[in-house]
Image (cartoon, helix red, strand yellow):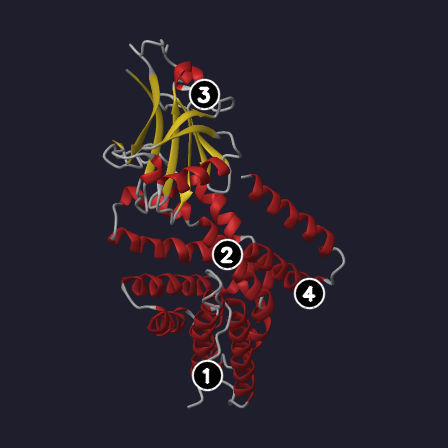
Amino acid sequence: MSDIVSILIVMIAASVALGSKIKEEDRLKVLSALWLVVILLSSSIISTEWARMTSELVDDEGDPHYGLPDIWEGKQVVCFDFPEDIAPEGYGGGRHHIDSDGTNFMTDSNWNGSGACVGGFSGYETGIDLFDEAVMASGGDFAYTSTQFSFGIQIDSIGGVEPCDVAPCPEDFSSGAYYALYHNGQLAPVGISDLPLDGDSVVTWTIMTW
Amino acid sequence: MLDAHAVTLSPAETLIMNILLLAIIGWSMWKAERGLNPGNDVAVLFLLGIFAVSGRVLLEPLPNVQPVTVVVLLAGIHYGAPRSVVLATSVALVSNLFLGHGIWTLYQAAAWSLVGVSGALLSERLAPSGTISVSRVAALSVVAAFLFDWTVSLSALHSFGAEMLPLYIVSGIPFDVLHASGNVFFVAWLAAPLSEMMSRHNLSRTVVREAVASRT
């Protein structure tokens, strides 16, 4: 919305500034050319901003994109789901939606949980590449720490949140918590490093307990 | 063997070339019209049709910016509803032979016809005492952009249910704005010269008006 308002302000200011200096019979010619050029040059920004403003959440529960903005249909998404009281700072109060350019454009306050989904990506073939890109798009808000094992990497924390912040992790391992990886709504059979992606994959990190 | 045409143009270069081609067509049309005998409205409609089709095809890289709506609107104002409908339908069909023909052609023809009929119905207000009011035509061309786009959007009902139509229309508003701003540009630059040209070949309509006036 702010981009569209900025463009409108620039157009109005330029029209007012130019309008008084142009002969009346030429005014519409010059101003219409100016408006057309500005709108054409900013059409991509306007379309993207408008699509975000008018997007709706996918309501088909069978769709891997369920609960995500419809402008991400056919695109790749990474979600970070947290319990309500433990989300990284600024990501409470529902699920936030961050576009691939880093714009936080929508919050689903009815979502049962908190966190964010970062989406609108395409062309990524493995989970780790998409994950890294999503972390970067979030401005590092979901930066992670990990431990490399022979079988792959284990995610120790995301956005400063460790699984054991959610549930107690006694040393005898009688209970515990961990970051679980879901791919299109199903528990991923392999780790993030080896996860092959579809063109519209939804990768979700969520804290599970045992 | 020499491949003399192995030149790849960038999108911007293609657009510049297309605008130059359209300028040549417009200038040629202007010169050709000067050689016509007054009252040859059929020939003028034909020239306008060529300009509108060329404009739509050549400006295709610019999203929803084309001169057809304004040309049809002016044809409605100067030549009345039936001829503007012929022009609108022909332009929709011929340009879609280049751009892609399908069920949407019917809706585009209907929508542009609606624009032409609107111009005809409002001709007394848009061209009071025979002189075109550029500001009024510009205002109507903005309305015409939305009227055209929303009418064509009805073709989407062939693909999905009516409940999706409002969302479909709302999501297309940036493209409607592009159409509207393009229309204002074309009105500002073309309405006066095209109206002058059409007025020179408007004798048959004047005759009809005079005939009707003499009967009443």
User: Do the dots labelled 2 and 3 sit on one chain?
Assistant: no
User: Do the dots labelled 3 and 4 sit on one chain?
Assistant: yes
- Circle 1 packing at 10 Å, graded few (<14), some (14-19), many (20+), is few
Q: Chain of mark 3?
A: A
Q: Secondary structure at mark 2?
A: helix
In this view, B145 is above or below B42: above
Q: Secondary structure at mark 1?
A: loop
Q: Quadrant of residue A36?
A: bottom right
Q: Give, as a three-letter code, the residue at label 2.
A: Leu
**Most extreme residue toward the front, as rendered?**
A150
Nearer the camera: disc 3 or disc 4: 3
Q: Which residue is tagged 4? A: A26
Q: Chain of mark 4?
A: A
User: Do the dots labelled 1 and 2 sit on one chain?
Assistant: yes
Nearer the camera: disc 4 or disc 2: 2
Q: From the viewer's perspective, is B119 left or right of B160?
A: right
Taking depth in this image into account, of A140 and A152 the one nearest to the observer is A152
Q: Which residue is tagged 1? A: B5
Q: From the viewer's perspective, is B93 left or right of B76?
A: left
- Circle 3 packing at 10 Å, graded few (<14), some (14-19), many (20+), is many
User: Do the dots labelled 4 and 1 sit on one chain?
Assistant: no
Q: Chain of mark 1?
A: B
Q: Confirm whether residue B193 shows in the render.
A: yes
- Determine contact: label 1, label 2, CB under 8 Å: no
Q: Which residue is tagged 2? A: B178
Give the spatial CA distance, label 1 vs label 2: 34 Å
Q: Which residue is tagged 3? A: A161
Which percent across, then down, holds residue B184? 56, 60
Which percent across, then down, holds residue A7? 60, 47
In this view, B169 is above or below B213: above
